Amino acid sequence: MRSVEARSSRGRLDPLTTDMIRTARVVVVTRRADLAGPVRDALARDGDLDIQVAHDVDDLSRGEAPPVAVVAGGDDAAWTVDACRRLATDPRQAGTLVIVVAAVEPAAALAAGAVHVVPPGGAAEAAAWAAALARATTRGEPLLGRAFARCPAGLALLDADLRCVRVNDALVELSALAPGQHRGRTLDEVLRRADLDAVHTAAREVLRDGRAREGLPVSGWSPRTSGMVWHGVVDLFAVEHGEVAFGLLLRDVTAERVAHAELSATLERERAARAEVEAYQERLAFVHIATGALYSTALDAALRARTLARLVVPSLADWCLVYARPRVEGETWRAAAHWDPDRQAQADALSASDDTPAWAAGPLDGGEPELVATPEDATPSDPDLVQALGLRSYAVVPLRAGRGPFGALLFGFAESSRRYTPRDVELLQDLAQRASIALENAELYRETELALRARDQLISIATHDVRNPLGAALLRLALMRTAVDRGDLQPDKLGDGVRRAEQALKDAVALLNDLLNVTRIASGRIELKLEKVDLRALTLEVIERSRELLQAAGCRVVAPPPGPTIVGRWDRIRLEQVVANLLSNASKYGRGKPIEVRLDVQGGRAHLAVQDHGVGIPPADQERIFERFARTWEGNRHDSHGLGLWIIKRVVTALGGRVWIESAPGAGATFHVELPTEPAAEDASLAVEP
């Protein structure tokens, strides 16, 4: 042990210069396999050493300095002494103890830096020395070196310039360098493409005050991490041990960061889902409140449409537009509302148009709801409206009732950042269904009111207009009875009285027939008995039967000239009623003036025209006169009950034709009837609009 003590006095085994965290590792340096085997086997029997074999000293310079090296030179004394000298003078091998197994002068080997010399056959002795020295240099704690190497956190010993003196395997995994290439490299070279600004700042502070800096965030990229960014936390502390100035502990927190990010994303999704559910529940509650408010509004469909538009802003939309078509032809219910009162004028302008808006065309045709989350995501059905209102998101849902689609609602966001989703569309459809029922109820209420009014009018006619001719007939009969009782009834007076009474009764019967037709037509069905009918012959017959009535009105009839037959499949009785009503109407409005009747047929459609030269009908009344009980001022003057033209239109419509008027005040009126010669259906009971 003399040589060991000699080396110790020079500081080779001094704890201040011995790496305390090195593994109890022994490297066998030899160029001969027959010498390496016995030494390695002898060392392996110790069971607690990390044994490696190097073929030359240069191989040791590529890795970390071992605590003990066994130079097995055999009989090559020169190579042995040279290897010892090189190990002793290499600064990177500082602290390595050298055991020589060779045929060499001990003095020469010791002078070259060896601590013990063993002859070539002393492998066991060399192993014993190597094990003892390895344990001595690690102060009897070989597990500490293993812990350094195998620690899951990155460990590094750094000099004052942050150059690596030693790194463990975990740090190697994060680095951009291969194992064994870290010594002498700066931390920036080892952890290439990493953000180390916080570490550099902390190093200056640690050098200044000696206090450790903990929790320094770092992140970087390494080929060993499959191109993924890694995240870590660094603790930097002072060591002041030889060339070592710092100790660095790097904990890889990438998995924690990822887990935290995933947890944060999950929590955010849950928060957003809760917010969406809460918002949906609020909107659903609003739908119920709005429904109650809508149903509490008066049973006026137009008023309810305006109320609906105002109710939904701004809770469900910035803009709300309503468009609906009632059963009454020519009418529409329109409304528009915006949450800003200053834009209500623009809303009123939107609801004033008579044209069907493009956005409502699809729902009216039975289409599906339209959702445009953003105008960039889809092509809007009404791009002009989107631009005019500045809509960023909108939804259109249909209004449906028992008769099918009859309108649509548009909900739009313009100023707010909200966007409609498919779930919102479901809610809006629910609201639209409730609104449809409210509007339909109002329409049915109006129709009921009209029906009751018509009933009252019918009763009034039955009690007044029918009573008048019956009263006149009773008066004539009473006068004749008085004359009979006095015995002065003259034949000419008798004939005149009978004729007048008969005419009064005929007028009453005609009116009762009209009232009966009203009842039948109002039920929605007219019973038709289709047969081949010659319209020319039928028209001439009706003119002949009405001649007395026309003469009483002072009207001369210009009948159609003889010509070919105009045959079609029509209901004879109903068609006679149409011609008779047209002649009666002409005699009332053109009293004392001629009446012209024209007939022709073209393209399978027969045409009848009855022209009077009376007072004419104002344009404002020309559509209304075909309504039930409609009368113009002139009609009132001539005691019209307002049923004839209504019956004509319904009968002609039931036969598949159409009726219209050409007139101007003071220029008379011409009523046109056009009928197909063949009906569209053979059903003898055709439905008509009541």
Image (tube, rainbow, N blue to C red):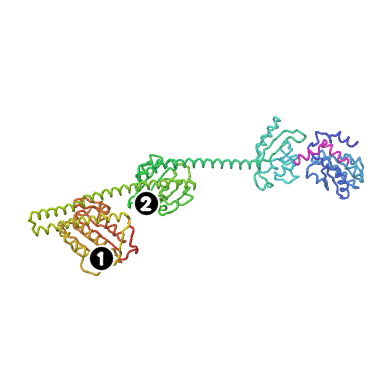
* Mark 2 secondary-structure assignment: loop
Amino acid on which disc 2 is placed: Thr
Q: Amino acid at mark 1?
A: Leu
Q: Residue extending furthest bottom?
A: 564
Q: Quadrant of the C terminus?
A: bottom left
- Residue 292 on the magenta segment: no
Please state, as top left, top right, bottom left or bottom right, where the N terminus lies in the image.
top right
Magenta extent: 128-150
- Give percent across and percent down for residue 172: 72, 43
| Image coords of residue 121 (percent x, y) | 92, 46
Answer with the quarter of the image where residue 567 lies. Answer: bottom left
* Residue 304 left/right relative to 599: right
- Mark 2 crowd level (few <14, some 14–19, many ≥20, 10 Å Cα): some
In this rendering, does residue 82 appear at all? no
Q: Of callouts 1 and 2, which one flags the residue occurring earlier in the amino acid sequence? A: 2
> Which residue position is annotated with label 1?
535
In this view of the protein, which residue sits in the foreground, 10 or 44? 44
- Of residue 517 and residue 325, the one placed in the foreground of this image is 517
Tell me residue 542's x, y (percent): 21, 63
Report helix, strand or loop for mark 1: helix
Q: What distance separates the C-alpha of mark 1 from that of mark 2?
A: 40 Å
Relative to 83, is 555 on the left or the right?
left
Would you say residue 143 sits in the magenta stretch?
Answer: yes
Task: Give the main secondary structure, helix, strand or loop, of the magenta stretch.
Answer: helix
The label nearer to you, 1 versus 2, is 1
Which residue in the protein does label 2 denote?
Answer: 356
Place of residue 320 in the rendered image (x, y in percent of width and height, measured from the top left)? 41, 44
